[in-house]
Structures are given as C-alpha cells and as structure tokens.
Amino acid sequence: MIFPDRAEEAVAIHSGDILRSQLEMLGPVAVKAEAPLPNFPPTHDGLPLAGLSPSYAYDALHALPAFTALPDTMSPSARCRSKSRVRPEEDIMTAKAKHTASTSASTTKGSSFHSSSFHDNTNNNNSFASVSSLRSVKNKELCPVTGYLSDISVDYQLSSTVLGKGHYGCVRECTHRVTRKRYACKSIDKSKIGRLDHLQREVYLLSKTNHPSIMRMVDCYEDPHHVHIVTEKYTGGELFDRIIENTAEEGCFSEQRAASIIKSLLESVAYLHKNGIVHRDIKPENILFETKDEDSAIRLIDFGLSRKYKQGDKLMCNPVGTAYYMSPELLRGKYDHGCDVWSVGTVAYILLAGYPPFNGNEDPDIFDAIKKGSFSFPSKAWGNKSSASKDFIKCLLRKDPRKRFNAEEALCHPWLQIGNAAPVKRQDELMTRLQSIRKSIKAIRVSQ
C-alpha cells in the first residue's frame, strides 16, 4: 500500500489491493503518493465518517432540447415532475420514482482536485488517499476523475442487491469490512459519461461540503471502467413522494412542518453560498428524508449541476435546472446564486399548496409564466394559511433578484422563526408589526 509520508520509496502493492487486470494495464509501478483530493470529510480512527445520500444525478451536459410537461388534466401536484429529460440522467433515487428533467447546457470547465476551493468549518485535512484507501496508485490516464487507481473491494464488501439503476450505472448496498457499517455505493460507468470533467467537478464540490442538511461523501474509488462513490444510506425517500401523499384540496403540509423543512433547506443553501457554491437544481426530488419518521431531517442532494460561484463573480449564463424551479433571470441567461433562493421559494409554495406557483400545459408556457413573475394564493388552498407564510414566499419569489431575499435574510423571516411553535394568530400579529415597520422605513427614506 502507499503511505503519503514515504513518497520517495517505491510503492509496494499487496496482491489483493489492486486487481490483477489493472496491474497488467499499468505495467511497472513506481510512483510517488500525492493526494488528489485535499480536505475530504474527517475520519475517525482512520475510518471515514457517514456520507451522502444514495442517489443523485450525474450530468453528461448535452444540448438543450425543449421540455415536455405533463398534461394539464393531471393533478396539480403530479404536474410538478417533468416527464422528459434534456439529457440522460440517472433515476436511482428509488426504483419506482423517475426524476424531473434537469436542463443543461453548461460549458464550465471542471475544477482540478489539486486547486483550493474554500475552507469549511471543519478541519478536513485528510487526503483522498487516506480517506478512500491507502491502497491507491496514481494514474491520471486510466483514472481522469480522481487521478488514482484504487480497488473498492479492498475496503468494502459489495452486495449483489441493486437498490436502483440509472442511465450511468447502479446503486448497491455495501458494508465496510472493518466497521461493518452499511452504506450505499453508486457505481458510474465512465464510458457512458460524455463529460468526465463535470463528474470530476461534482465529486470535488461534494468533497468540500460538510453540513447536516447536505449529503456528505464517505469514500470515492476509481478503476479503469467505473467511479464508485460510497454514500450514507438514507431510507426516508424523496420530499416529492411525501408531497404526493399529503396533497389535498386544502393544501399539503402544515405550516409548522413546512417551515421546518424550508428552514433546514435554507440553512444548507446559505452554507453553500457562503462557501462559493451554487446548486442550480433545488427541487423536491433532490431533497431526501434521512428516515421514514414524520419529523425526519432532510438532506439536499444532487450536485450534478452545481458549480463554484462567489459574490462579485461574472454572472452565469447557462440555462440549467428544472422547469418549475428556474428563476426569471436564469431563463434570460444572466443570473447569480439568487436562483437557488427562487427555487426554495417555489418549493415552499408547493409544500403549503400542493401545486407549483407557475404552471402551464407545456414547458414554454411554464417559462413564460415564470418570466412574468405573477402568482396568486387561491383561497381553497391558502384560505387557512397565515399572512406570514404568504409574505415569506413573496420575499423569495420577487422577480427582480436585487430585491429578492438572499438565504441569510430569508432565515431571519418571522415565519421561520416562529413557524415551529407559535399559532397562526400570533404570526399574523407579528406580520402586522413587520409591515408597519416597513412603511415607517419607506416614509423616512422619502422625507430624506
């Protein structure tokens, strides 16, 4: 195996560490051990901590054809999930669920694993080689994603049971040979990936995140044919499925539960934005519950369309995302990380009403509705909702991104502060006071 502190020595490879076929392809091996992925999630006693969700889409980033929305005769909540895809995308969240199409025309170059991204709040000083395994050999030709050839079977026992299949591979349960902990292993067939640099970028960004509401990587291995990503196994299913189960004429989730979910989601978005990452595909299908419990915590998944973006950077121009959740400025091709906040506002609306604020028979109709930015609160679903909840959604769905709340500001809104404890009447009282303060501020500005 390779020890980073003995880089000058020839690499000694145990016969079980790397497949014989891989060694034959490599030929004589005598390389230095260099870490391609700095600052991976921390380990405990040399073993990786729990990681991310068992499923998220990998992006081939092909051309951008038109959407095909579900017919208007279907239930409002059922129309939230688009039927067609802009490019091949893995559908392995659950065996029965097909994910919403994510459009992509990105041409952003993938980040190097050696380049620095940002520093999170943990001391992630472990190299990729020490996290995935010390049994890895540097080979960028065979392994362009991680730069290292490694054998997952050395550290994990893979089950023959397939948890889900997708266009690029499958997800199986795996067990760590030392701790006996069970995880999910997502194996991606590299021959089916059009742009490996985008897969590299996704893995890189995942290695840089460490937040309780975001999926976290456990391990990553690469052999000549596959990239294997070991993730924490979540069992609660998609938020989308729970929306379908709970939707009725009077709405969907209670305000308390909806506020709890949205608060956790906004905390994850605020964390990403603070650390220079924009998600660009926030939707109920990309939000998983950790367990089947009613009050289960959530995890934001699927970083296939994510990229690095900091305040002050040049505006992004590639129209990527999912129809119902794309912001007006994103559709026009000039946008920043405010597109994520718009998506959260759309999710909040759906959680309370059971249907999206912007709809249409075809995706061009949805896009036109989004660009107009006009939406309403029909009394059937919103008659029993508080003024605070409606104001919160208005603040996140402001057409002008300069007037729209950012994630940090949204977290300070009264609806999220009291949504888990205070009654609706109390919320309305606080909203009345808030509106009074706003009017006073406007009056002062005019007088000046």
Image (cartoon, grey):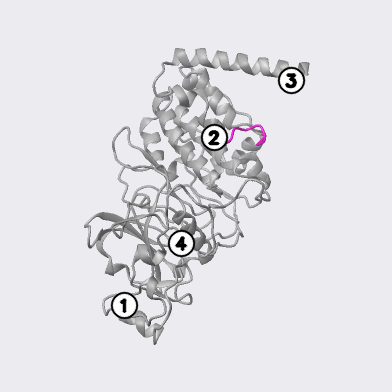
Q: Is residue 31 left or right of residue 106?
A: left
Which residue has dot 4 on it?
Answer: 38
Q: Is residue 254 visible?
A: no
Q: Amino acid at mark 3?
A: Arg
Q: Residue at x 32, y 53 (%)?
A: 49
Circle 4 Cα neighbour tier, 10 Å, few/some/many (<14 / 14–19 / ≥20): many
Where is residue 214? Give x, y as percent: 42, 46
**Quadrant in which the C terminus appears:** top right
Disc 1 target residue:
19
- First-in-chain label (4 vs 2): 4
| SS under mark 2 | helix
Q: Quadrant of residue 251?
A: top left
Tag 2 residue: 408
Amino acid on which disc 1 is placed: Leu
Residue 22, can we see it?
Answer: yes
Dot 2 alpha-carbon crowd within 10 angstroms: few under 14, some 14 to 19, many 20 or more = some
Magenta span: predominant SS is loop
Residue type marked 2: Glu
Q: Amino acid at mark 4?
A: Pro
Which residues fall within the magenta stretch?
Answer: 400-406
| Residue position for label 3 | 445
Residue in the foreground of this view, choosing between 355 and 104: 104
